[in-house]
Amino acid sequence: MEKHLLVAIGDEYTSSLSLRYVYGFFSRREDVKLTLFYVAPKTDPRHDAGHHGHEKSAPSRCLSGDAAAALPAMEKARNWLFDMGFPKKNVFVKACRGDQGIVKDIIKECEQGLYDAAVLGRRGLSWFDEMFSDSVSHKILWEAIGFPIWVCRNPDPNRKDVLVCLDESSQCQRAADHVGFILANEPAHDVTLLHIRDEHGQDPAPFFAKARQALAENGIAATRVRHKTITAKDPAQAILKMAKTENFAAVAIGRTGGRPQAFMDQIVGSTSLKLLRNLEGAALWLCK
């Protein structure tokens, strides 16, 4: 089953993270389509005027094909994929003028293009620094989105398999379904279903059964799936520890809730935010 991912292209460093991750994760690259997507800075409307005061027709908001590939950032990203042997017929490029801001433009493109996920690179800044900077990976978490996002920070190409974090939420079950879709016909990775409970937590058997069913419906054999339940007071720390010690290539989790209402909420954060701030080596796959 063919997958189509949008890979956000920005500065050279963050773009290289997302490109390296996607290239390294898939063993059957012929089954993966990539659209490299670049949001250009907003332009002064006066720049659209022709010489001698004559107005020329408004330029298209978006460029694709050779016109988009001529942009230096796009040319470098596309050529890197080609040099690494990624099928040329599976790589597309699109550049759009920023009308609503990078985050909203990425969301608009993903919803219109029906991509299976948006892939974002992330710098290695501290979470406190990024809280007050223009961090696309942070800001997109607050939006109402109907597609998964992958956030890549210092990906390790030697890692494999996907850790799926489960609870009773529909978002976590959507994460399991997304993992099943991505790993269908992708033999390089297996799945571990994880539930973290407190001392009085409910029986996780229904969570596991539903997630296993979603994986099976996507063609994932039962032999590729295992499950694990642990008790921990800090779920994020437990997930980070497992991701590191067992060398997972991705951690998939559902995200509930919206924008923090107070500064202290941002500092404390949810499990998904803590993972965004601290997960390295593996990518974070988020479903809302």
Image (tube, rainbow, N blue to C red):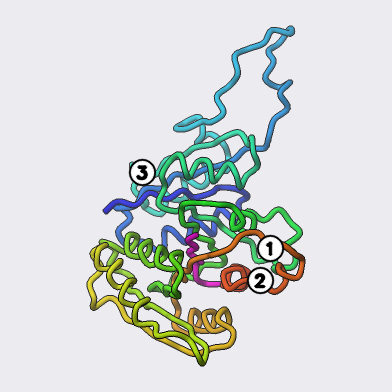
Q: Nearer the viewer, residue 42 or 50?
A: 42
The image quadrant of residue 228 is bottom left
The first of marks 1 and 3 along the sequence is 3
Residue 88, numbered circle: 3
- On the image, numbered disc 2 is attached to which residue? 269
Residue 260, numbered circle: 1
The first of marks 2 and 3 along the sequence is 3
Q: Secondary structure at mark 2?
A: loop
Query: Which residues lie in the magenta part?
Result: 280-288
The image quadrant of residue 59 is top right
Q: Give amino acid for label 3.
A: Lys
Instruction: State the quadrant of the N terminus.
Output: bottom left
Q: Secondary structure at mark 3?
A: helix
**Measured Cα–Cα span from mark 1 to mark 3:** 42 Å
**Measured Cα–Cα span from mark 1 to mark 2:** 8 Å
The first of marks 1 and 2 along the sequence is 1
Q: Give amino acid for label 1.
A: Pro
| Circles 1, 2 touching at the beta carbon (< 8 Å) | yes
User: Which residue appears at 55% of the width and 24% of the height?
Assistant: 60
Q: Nearer the viewer, residue 79 or 74?
A: 74
User: Which residue appears at 71% of the width and 10% of the height?
Assistant: 51
